[in-house]
Image: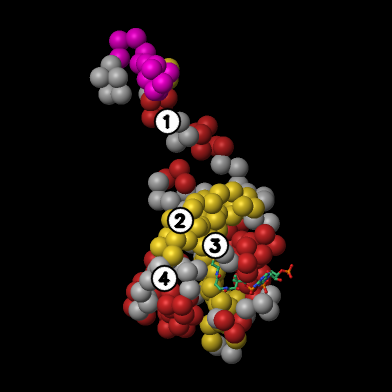
Amino acid sequence: MIRFATPEDAPDICSIYNHFVENTTITFEEKPVDQEEMRQRIVENAAVLPWLVWTEENKVQGFCYASKWKTRSAYRHSVESTIYLHPQSIRRGIGTQLYSSLLDRLRQRGMHVVIGGIALPNEASVALHEKLGFRKVACFEQVGWKFNEWIDVGYWQLFLEGVTDHSHERCSSRIGQSRPAAWGMKMRWKGGAPHFVAPRGQRTRENH
Ligand SMILES: CC(C)(COP(=O)(O)OP(=O)(O)OC[C@H]1O[C@@H](n2cnc3c(N)ncnc32)[C@H](O)[C@@H]1OP(=O)(O)O)[C@@H](O)C(=O)NCCC(=O)NCCS
């Protein structure tokens, strides 16, 4: 069964996640997460984005959630996704169902892009992401150091279909514009760098 996570799931989630923290390079955390910290993560994250669990006989066998990709406001339609299953529950189609359910919920919320960062190699995760329509867009080499080795991280991206049209944000406000553009300034390239030109009679912080 798939349902939203609650803070009471923290012990089960810790025992799944800490196995990967302590034994693999799949996550870049290096110290086990205690239950109180996990409770806090669930509460804080679930307040803004979906955090789902897969349960069997009332025991959590896997979890999947979305978190902000970056905190700067223009990133607000992009999220990063995370999924972990209990080792006994892998390769039974649970990952596909749980992740699909998360994607449905993100679509309903009008999210535009989902990004999966995968520490490489991870055949299972790559297969799952590509099965769900993600495509590889980047790979950062040797950005992690764990268990005495450098680890590359690949990024897979999915555009969600049927998303809300956000163009009204640009029409009804100045959110989509750079600040100088919103102030009526024109950008010119000068000496290889952008240079903002203010309308006649105005001085700018950028230029002075
Ligand atoms: C990655 C993970 C969530 C996948 O979930 P899963 O339930 O095992 O995946 P599914 O059974 O739904 O399989 C999805 C697809 O991936 C393929 N796949 C799964 N494991 C695979 C493996 N080890 N090697 C190659 N393909 C694999 C399946 O064949 C299936 O494709 P198909 O339907 O075309 O046959 C799960 O293996 C897991 O929790 N791994 C440990 C944690 C982890 O790596 N999390 C991701 C961090 S980026």
- Residue type at mark 4: give it: Phe
Q: Quadrant of residue 185?
A: top left
Neighbor class of circle 1 (other Cα within 10 Å; few <14, some 14-19, many 20+) is few
Q: How is the image coloured?
A: secondary structure
Numbered tag placed on residue 127 in the rendering: none
Residue identified by numbered label 1: 178
Is label 1 in a helix, a strand or a loop?
Answer: loop
Which dot, 1 or 3, sits closer to the camera?
Answer: 3
In the image, which residues are magenta? 189-202
Is label 2 in a helix, a strand or a loop?
Answer: strand
The residue located at (48%, 34%) in the rendering is 176
Is label 3 in a helix, a strand or a loop?
Answer: loop
Quarter of the rendered image showing ligand 1:
bottom right
Numbered tag placed on residue 147 in the rendering: 4
Instruction: Look at the image and tell me whether residue 182 can be seen.
Output: yes
Q: Earlier in the sequence, mark 4 or mark 3?
A: 3
The residue located at (64%, 53%) in the rendering is 135
> Depth check: 53 or 130 in front?
130
Residue identified by numbered label 3: 120
Give the Cα distance between marks 2 and 1: 34 Å
Contact (Cβ within 8 Å) of mark 4 with mark 3: no
Which dot, 4 or 1, sits closer to the camera?
Answer: 4
- Residue type at mark 1: give it: Ser
Seen as rendered, the residue at the extreme top is 200
Under 8 Å from ligand 1: the CB of mark 4? no
Residue identified by numbered label 2: 142
Q: Earlier in the sequence, mark 1 or mark 3?
A: 3
Instruction: Look at the image and tell me whether residue 186 can be seen.
Output: no
Q: Earlier in the sequence, mark 2 or mark 1?
A: 2
